[in-house]
């Protein structure tokens, strides 16, 4: 058990911030909303046994969210030049969202579709995702044990976060990821591998529990003033679980799209669950910003360079803002290059500083899932109507997406399903940019829509290091899992 700290800072007007520190000792604050870690006059030790108490639930929740944030969007806590990758950066690099702009061999090979099981970088990211899974599931156990779950939504939130960790394993890794556990007495239990459908089924189970827990929240009251906030709270957590469930159902198969659409039918476009970042500690920094803008290890590619994918740079879109700085040098102005001093450094500006929040689940995604169900049913007019509704009122939680975006025009009659599919996945790519959706969408284009690999992922010569693009469409399980007697290696590397 890693000791945890919960702290708040309202200096940026974004509410509570989360920090997790360890591995042995931490400075503990009083568990109140008004405390600040720098104000502590009597440091103490938080032992695991002290977390077996209802008063510790806010600390446990904070730790689980902090672990999830690192697994998802990374941090600035360690790694190369302060870059700790999460699923967003690693998934985006194997997809077409990002490109390598530095010299580290692990990332170059991953960008060239040749990720290696020996990679220390991939090992850290994999471990962080398992740590997030473990933290969320342990937190859920604590809420079941100590909280009044008719008034405390913590159980629903933790179950949904646990569900998303299984979604990321299913979307970004090979089939056959092992899931080990730790018993209450501290003993370690090696887990066996789960297939991709089994990981998604496990995620759906967690989301179903989260939705049921949210539905059980008390909404009673003798006046609308008392009832209304309770009803809004219950709906928020039901929406959170519903978007996660719909995403997992969509990943399972096209036949599950109707069920996915039904799951999010009542989720409004304004719903959002954000992972917040901060400047309080490097652990709390936004790792996507650090990895790209600050340390220049990732950049934004473009299909105009000969890569298969979207024209992220050459087609301007407020949902996917990209720019390249011109720096001052001893020889005059010079367009910025990456850490390798060669690759042009094009930066994203969706996350423009280390405290930028990242969307995890949104009403926009719910509407995109409904649009894909319309596509599946052959209702192209309905799909277009849903996509244009989002464009007409871009949700405020997407940075730089405030003013209406011009509507999409109806497809010409001969275009048919293939062109409509291109439109739908292009819209998903723009709305859900840098939120760990794109790799899964590219895999689904192969697995569910029968697109050939060379029309989805780049092939042929890689742009540096004399490499050729490989064939990977997902990440392998790192080498240290070979210590698990129940695991040999991926069951398959299929899309």
Image (cartoon, rainbow, N blue to C red):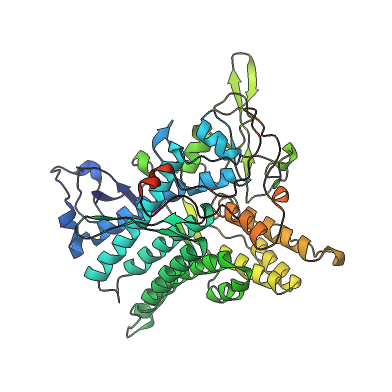
Q: Which residue shows up at 62% across the image and 70% down it?
A: 370
Quadrant in the picture for the C terminus: bottom right
Q: Nearer the viewer, residue 339 or 329?
A: 339
Q: Which residue shows up at 19% across the image and 62% down it?
A: 55
The vertical placement of 381 against 393, above or below, is below
Q: Position of residue 152 (x, y in %)?
A: 30, 70
Q: Position of residue 78 (x, y in %)?
A: 38, 35
Q: Position of residue 222 (x, y in %)?
A: 32, 86
Q: Is residue 13 visible?
A: no
The vertical placement of 146 against 10, above or below, is below
Q: Quadrant of residue 179?
A: bottom left
**Total marks placed:** 0
Q: Nearer the viewer, residue 283 or 445?
A: 445
Q: Position of residue 473 (x, y in %)?
A: 60, 49
Q: Quadrant of residue 230?
A: bottom left
Say whether residue 250 is left or right of residue 63.
right
The residue positioned farthest toward the bottom in the image shown: 222
The residue positioned farthest toward the top in the image shown: 330
Q: Is residue 383 visible?
A: yes
């Amino acid at each position: 058990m890693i000791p945890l700290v919960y702290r708040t800072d309202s200096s940026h007007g974004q509410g509570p911030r989360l920090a997790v520190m360890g591995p042995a000792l931490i400075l503990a604050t009083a568990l109140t909303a008004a405390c600040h870690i720098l104000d502590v006059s009597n440091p103490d030790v938080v032992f695991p046994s002290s977390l077996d108490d209802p008063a510790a639930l806010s600390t446990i929740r904070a730790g689980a969210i902090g672990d999830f944030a690192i697994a998802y969007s990374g941090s600035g806590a360690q790694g190369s030049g302060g870059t700790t990758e999460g699923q967003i950066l690693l998934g985006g690099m194997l997809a077409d969202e990002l490109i390598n702009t530095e010299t580290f061999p692990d990332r170059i090979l991953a960008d060239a579709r040749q990720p290696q099981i020996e990679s220390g970088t991939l090992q850290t990211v994999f471990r962080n995702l398992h740590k997030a899974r473990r933290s969320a599931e342990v937190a859920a156990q604590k809420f079941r044990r100590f909280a009044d779950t008719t008034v405390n939504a913590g159980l629903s939130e933790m179950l949904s976060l646990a569900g998303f960790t299984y979604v990321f394993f299913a979307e970004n890794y090979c089939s056959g990821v092992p899931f080990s556990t730790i018993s209450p007495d501290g003993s370690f239990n090696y887990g066996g591998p789960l297939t991709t459908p089994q990981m998604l089924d496990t995620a759906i189970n967690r989301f179903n529990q989260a939705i049921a827990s949210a539905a059980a929240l008390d909404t009673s009251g003798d006046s609308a003033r008392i009832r209304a906030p309770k009803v809004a709270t219950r709906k928020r957590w039901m929406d959170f679980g519903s978007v996660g469930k719909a995403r997992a159902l969509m990943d399972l198969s096209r036949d599950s799209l109707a069920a996915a659409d039904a799951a999010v039918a009542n989720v409004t476009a304004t719903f959002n669950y954000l992972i917040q970042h901060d400047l309080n500690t490097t652990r709390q920094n936004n790792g996507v910003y650090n990895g790209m803008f600050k340390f220049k290890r990732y950049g934004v590619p473009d299909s105009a360079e000969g890569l298969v994918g979207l024209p992220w740079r050459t087609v301007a879109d407020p949902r996917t803002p990209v720019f390249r700085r011109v720096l001052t040098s001893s020889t005059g102005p010079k367009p910025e290059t990456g850490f390798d001093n060669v690759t042009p450094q094009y930066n994203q500006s969706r996350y423009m500083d280390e405290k930028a929040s990242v969307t995890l689940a949104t009403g926009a995604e719910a509407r995109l899932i409904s649009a894909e169900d319309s596509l599946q049913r052959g209702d192209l007019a309905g799909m277009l109507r849903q996509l244009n509704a989002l464009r007409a009122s871009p949700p405020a939680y997407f940075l730089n997406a405030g003013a209406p975006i011009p509507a999409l025009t109806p497809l010409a009659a001969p275009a048919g399903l293939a062109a409509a599919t291109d439109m739908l996945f292009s819209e998903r790519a723009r709305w859900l940019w840098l939120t760990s959706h794109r790799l899964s969408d590219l895999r689904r284009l192969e697995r569910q829509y029968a697109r050939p690999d060379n029309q989805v992922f780049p092939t042929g010569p890689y742009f540096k290091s004399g490499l050729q693009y490989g064939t990977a469409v997902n990440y392998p399980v790192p080498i240290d899992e070979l210590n698990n007697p129940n695991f040999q290696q991926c069951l398959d590397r299929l899309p």
